[in-house]
Amino acid sequence: MSVPEVVPIAYEPDYRTPTIGRWDGGQFFASVTAAFPEGWTVDDDWRERKRWYAVLHRFDEAGGHLGSSIASTGTTAQGERGAVDAAGTLLDGWLDALPGRRYESIAIAPFAVRFEGALFGLVVEDHGEDGEGEWAEFYPDGLGFSAPWDGLYDT
């Protein structure tokens, strides 16, 4: 089954999607997440390469990508707890600035943004060789969406 034009994403406040929903300007997906640069392979410098980010993607009511705010707050080598806390504080401010914000399930179209060499977005992938078919992966959060396209995800 092909990826739909807009992919439902379930609001799960006690799991991986507690900061998604709608605001007066449309929909949003926000998270504190870590990413490695695209093409990176495991080496001894993984702590230097693992960067922490505050991320806020904004979408119109139909699910089209309007823009993204992405900011790095440090690497694991610089202190993971401090980087995560700083990203959370920054993200809280961005969310507070969304008028009419409410947390709930959303449905968005695939999109991709690259920042500091890392991929962010909802990307369609074809895994036909293993029988899975097309699915959508939310990067770098590691959420995989597939049929029956009910908003639930695999991690």
Image (spheres, grey):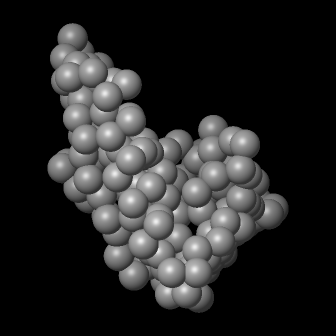
Q: Nearer the viewer, residue 109 or 53?
A: 53
Which image quadrant for residue 49?
Answer: top left
Q: Residue at x 47, y 66 (%)?
A: 96
* Residue 15: image location, x then y, percent: 69, 42
Residue farthest toward the top in the current orientation of the protein = 44
Compared to 9, does 37 lie above or below? Answer: above
Which image quadrant for residue 150?
Answer: bottom right
**Left or right position of 67 against 124:** left
- Is residue 155 in view from this perspective? yes
Quadrant where the C terminus sits is top right
* Residue 113: image location, x then y, percent: 31, 64
Q: Nearer the viewer, residue 128 or 8?
A: 8
Which image quadrant for residue 36?
Answer: top left
**Left or right position of 8 against 34:** right
* Residue 2: image location, x then y, percent: 66, 69
Q: Residue at x 71, y 67 (%)?
A: 104
Counting the numbered discs, the total is 0
- Is residue 36 in view from this perspective? no
Quadrant where the N terminus sits is bottom right
Q: Residue at x 59, y 47 (%)?
A: 143
Q: Residue at x 37, y 25 (%)?
A: 81
Q: Nearer the viewer, residue 55 or 151?
A: 55
* Residue 76: image location, x then y, percent: 29, 24
